Image (tube, rainbow, N blue to C red):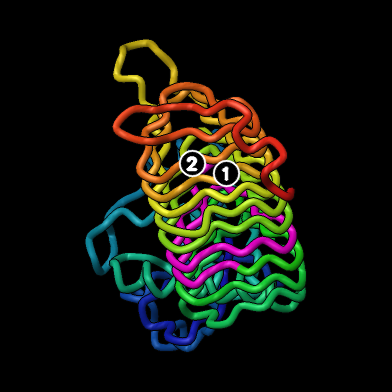
Amino acid sequence: MLAFEPDDPRAYGRIVRAPDGSLDAIVEAADATPEQLQLREVNSSIYVFSGSKLWPVIDRLRPQNAQGELYLTDVVRLLREDGENVGVATASDPGDLDGVNNRVELADAGAKLRDRVNREHMLAGVTIVDPQSTWIEPDVEIEADSTIHPFTVLRGKTRVLTGAEVGPHVVAVDAEIGRGVTVGPFCYLRPGTVLAAGAKAGTFVELKNTRVGEGAKVPHLSYLGDADVGEGANVAAGNITANFPHQPGRPKGRTTFGKNVRTGIHNGFQAPVEIGDDAWIAGGTYITEDVPPESLAGFPPRQITKEGYLRGKRDN
């Protein structure tokens, strides 16, 4: 079992030691003598038992106490009487043993864990602008010289590499944010998202299971799911990948944007569809067919593709 010295020991059972310093008994506060209440070493209610020793002793518990309850703590005394070995370990940090009995205590415990995690990252060279508004789960990895802005939540196995700038108001879950990447504000990176070095996912952008290549940008107001964005591409505002098939058993399709692709505003892409390298998409277009490299596609109400239109007309 684990013991510790609390700030307020009134609600805790006391650790009673034998003259040789070994654990003799655990006495609940309601049953303790005035002398026992002066003891500062208290019970954390964390135990490790051998099952074969525990179950027979539990059958011998009786509610002969001030609260008329069966005390698990009486097991210690009974095991001692049977000649069994009973030990106690002392916790180095009482905060590790805080009890949670209501939502207030849950919030307090969460804040302590948040502060501990943030402190470790800051001591390792990460800039966290406002630690009290930044929540980082324990399994998140952040390299030195990255910056995390206020009201950012990093969850799961998210990785943030050197020089990245994340937030404010960013949520990232099981995502990889590469070197020198800019994310946010108000951006949602869902599981499977990878932002390569120098990429950008901007304001009110949501990405799911999407890879954004080196130097590529999804600056604002777009949703890309199950997509690949090539190096140097720019996906403009209001672009959406439509990848849900609506047919039972049919998998989601994938949308691929080649290198240096440029899209206009308010584009939809019906997956599976591929936009070739150096192609442009006119604004307000719903793309349902592949677009060859260096082509211009769009012109609503239906897609028209001018193959090779951009060949020799743009400086890459």
Tell me what residue is drawn at x 36 percent, y 26 percent.
244
Residue range in magenta is: 166-192
**Among numbered discs 1 and 2, the one appearing first in the sequence:** 1
- As drawn, the label of residue 208 is 2
Of the pair 263 and 105, the residue shown nearer to us: 263
- As drawn, the label of residue 68 is none
x then y, percent, for residue 2: 58, 63
Crowding near pointer 1: few (<14 within 10 Å), some, many (20+)?
many
Mark 1 lies on a secondary structure that is: loop
Tell me what residue is drawn at x 33 percent, y 35 percent.
300
Tell me what residue is drawn at x 67 percent, y 43 percent.
313
Crowding near pointer 2: few (<14 within 10 Å), some, many (20+)?
some
Q: Identity of the amino acid at label 2?
A: Lys
Task: State if disc 2 and disc 1 touch (CB < 8 Å).
Answer: yes
Of the pair 257 and 87, the residue shown nearer to us: 257
In terms of image quadrants, where is residue 230?
A: top right
Give the Cα distance between marks 1 and 2: 6 Å
In terms of image quadrants, where is residue 242?
A: top left
Name the residue carrying label 1.
Answer: 193
Of the pair 85 and 283, the residue shown nearer to us: 283
Q: Judge left or right: residue 179 versus residue 283.
A: right
Q: Judge left or right: residue 47 versus residue 265.
A: right
Tell me what residue is drawn at x 61 percent, y 42 percent.
261
Q: Judge left or right: residue 223 versus residue 96.
A: left
Residue 15 in sight here: no
In terms of image quadrants, where is residue 178?
A: bottom right
